[in-house]
Image: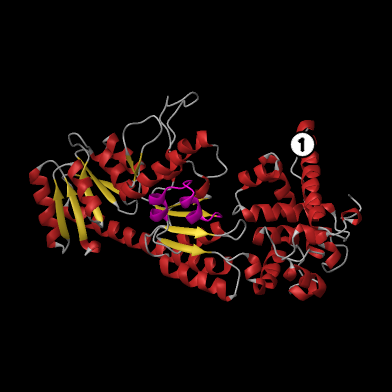
Amino acid sequence: MTENRILVVDDEESMRQYLSILLEKEGYEVVAASSGAEALQLMEAEPFAVVLSDIQMPKVDGIQLLKGIKAIDPTTPVIMLTAYASEQSAIDAVNLGAYSYLQKHCKNDEIKVAVRNALQLRQTRRENVHLKRELTRTRGQTRIIGQSSRMQDVYRLVGKISATPATVLINGESGTGKELIARSIHERSERADKPFVPINCGAIPETLLESQLFGHVKGAFTGADRDHDGFCRQAQGGTIFLDEIGETPHAIQVKLLRMLQEREIYPVGSSKPVKVDLRVIAATNRDLDQEVAAGRFRTDLFYRLNVIPIDLPPLRARRDDIPLLCDHFLRKTWPDYPGKLGAALEDDALRALTAYDWPGNVRELENVLERASIIREGERIMRHDLPPAVATPLPSAASASEAIGTHVPLEQIERLHIEQVLASVSGHKKRAADILEINPSTLYRKLLRYETGEDAPYGEDEAADREARDATDAIAAAVLAGMRESADEPETVAVGDAL
């Protein structure tokens, strides 16, 4: 059993035999290694409850062995054996994480006591990890809000897969809570006490993505004045969350495939592979099947990632959860929340929130409620406290041309047109910007305004401000042209006072 298995490491055969006989008489299962390198191989093959190691050994000494053991399993107590009690290397070992150190010629009882105490420490550590995992597991159950049948299916799947090491691919529109699901899986797993490292692959420039993921060595490129671990090594022992995996370029996809297959990476500028022990959870708002068919995403990487797919429903597909989410978010943002949703949100406002289609999903709902709780004038949030697009939304099945003859604000028509174009290209913002004939940064600003109700700052860049106004004019012209083509009487088109 692991709880009684002890590893003894010493280059002197007589010392190995002495310790082995002593500890076996105490009922322990003892495995002996004659070198630090052999000990590390044994540690990688099977766990040990305690390690007793000499400090002074050729090639891989006790300090190097200690570092290697801590990298493999930080919870394993290591007792260092030294010829002299005051030896500086023994003190250094304790500072590096060794449980304690003993003189080689100490009394047998001292060795027995040290081993018993080390075993007790390991057991305490394991219990603490278990308690922490249980605590985060129960907390995780309350952090994901929703009682709809679609979300219940997601909860059941998360519960089944969390304890496994399997790679997970989370599919869902922007704002549906993909990172929240990834964190819940990590917190319920055996890796809960190790790092959870999220990275948005679409937010990092291609020229920096490889270095950020896999690290680099000093001198690898201009400005690399020191070694950098990268996100994969920062997640060692834990979980790395690769959000927007569909945005990664082909060159990075090849390296991610190697990491998944071989569990090793190559830092930029290095020819030596580095082993990594981590779980991979990826997420995308694209249809990766279509991306594979179009040649933009590697087939082999897709199948490596798509071991366990989780499909997160958009908010419009689980409207029953909107009142629960409203209550949850208002409790977070309302300092003097009245205690129940009915006292905070007027019925007509709740009907408007439930009827709206939420293209920005849960994230957009949270932003709208935060805004409404701040600008409200009465004790409750009223319908007129909501953004116009939410308070008086266009029908979800409407097209821009159905606004003919109605006085619809230009901003709503612009937003509807942008959403339709995004939907037609599966949410790919760069392609949508090309179709709209606007700069991608302008599109990002508009989408941010739709989610938050606020404009992204342009600073003093008059060219960017002018570009945004020109983009609005261009989109309005495109929508109006489409309307006129489909209208029986184009001269009588009225799209609102703004036009």
The residue drawn where x is 64% and y is 56% is 423
- Main secondary-structure element of the magenta-colored stretch: helix
Residue 220 falls within the magenta-colored stretch: no
Residue where numbered disc 1 is placed: 467
Q: 280 or 197: nearer the eye? A: 280
Amino acid carrying mark 1 in the image: Glu
| Left or right of 166, for residue 176 | right
Asked if residue 387 can be seen in this view, the reply is no
Query: Where's residue 187, x and y in %?
Result: 47, 61
Q: Secondary structure at mark 1?
A: helix
Residue at the spot 31% in from the left edge and 61% down from the top edge: 120
Q: Is residue 295 left or right of residue 83?
A: right
Colour scheme: secondary structure
| Residue 311 vs residue 420, the one in the foreground | 420
Residue 361: image x %, image y %?
65, 61
Q: Position of residue 154 (x, y in %)?
A: 51, 69
Q: Where is residue 13 drawn, in percent x and y?
A: 8, 44
Q: Quadrant of residue 97?
A: top left
Q: Residue at x 90, y 53 (%)?
A: 491
User: Is 297 contained in the magenta span?
Assistant: yes
186 left or right of 424 in image: left
Identify the magenta region.
285-305
The quarter of the image holding the N terminus is bottom left
| Crowd tier of the residue under label 1, counting other residues whose Cα lies within 10 Å: few below 14, some 14–19, many 20 or above | some
